[in-house]
Amino acid sequence: MNSIECRIFEVLYDIKEPLTGYEIAKIIGAPISSTYYFLDKMAEKNIVVKFQGQGKKKTLYGLNPIFFSTEFWEKVIQSLKEIVEKMYELNCEFGYPDPEYALRVLINAIIKK
């Protein structure tokens, strides 16, 4: 995810209620066109849910409910632990027995995506 997608995710996660693209753009300080572009990309990836609002609010965007699930985050944390453990094993095999190195490599790989 790029920085705009990260900010969209954070806003929707913190506010916990659907917002219009305009409202999201205003909060994150991004151009409206860019905000709508990334909201559509995030909807394609099922990160956000897009639906029709009532009254003057047209299309609303909310975070996929899975992201509010404790079970989901427990699985994410467990998966990350397993990845770090595997990276540590591989690093030891190649002569880099520093656990922090394995974690830095993982974080850098995540940030670059």
Image: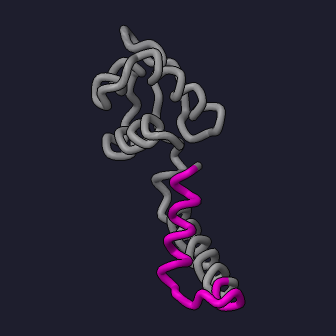
Please say if 77 is above or below 64. Answer: below
Residue 102: quadrant of the picture: bottom right
**96 to the left or right of 7:** right
Residue at 51 percent of width and 18 percent of height: 52
**17 to the left or right of 62:** left
Please say if 54 is above or below 35. Answer: above
Front position in the image: 86 or 62: 86
Front position in the image: 70 or 14: 14
Chief SS of the magenta region: helix
Front position in the image: 6 or 106: 106
**83 to the left or right of 66:** right
Is 95 covered by the magenta stretch?
yes
Give x and y (percent) for residue 103. Answer: 51, 74
Residue at 56 percent of width and 51 percent of height: 112
Give x and y (percent) for residue 22. Answer: 36, 18
Span colored in magenta: 91-112
Give x and y (percent) for residue 37. Answer: 53, 22
- For this orientation, the residue located farthest to the top is 56
Is 79 covered by the magenta stretch?
no
Rendering colour mode: one colour
Please say if 38 is above or below 67. Answer: above
- For this orientation, the residue located farthest to the front is 95
Please say if 46 is above or below 25. Answer: below
Residue at 51 percent of width and 46 percent of height: 65
**84 to the left or right of 69:** right
Question: How many numbered circles does the render carry?
Answer: 0
Front position in the image: 1 or 11: 1
Residue at 63 percent of width and 75 percent of height: 83
Give x and y (percent) for residue 98. Answer: 52, 87
Residue 14: quadrant of the picture: top left
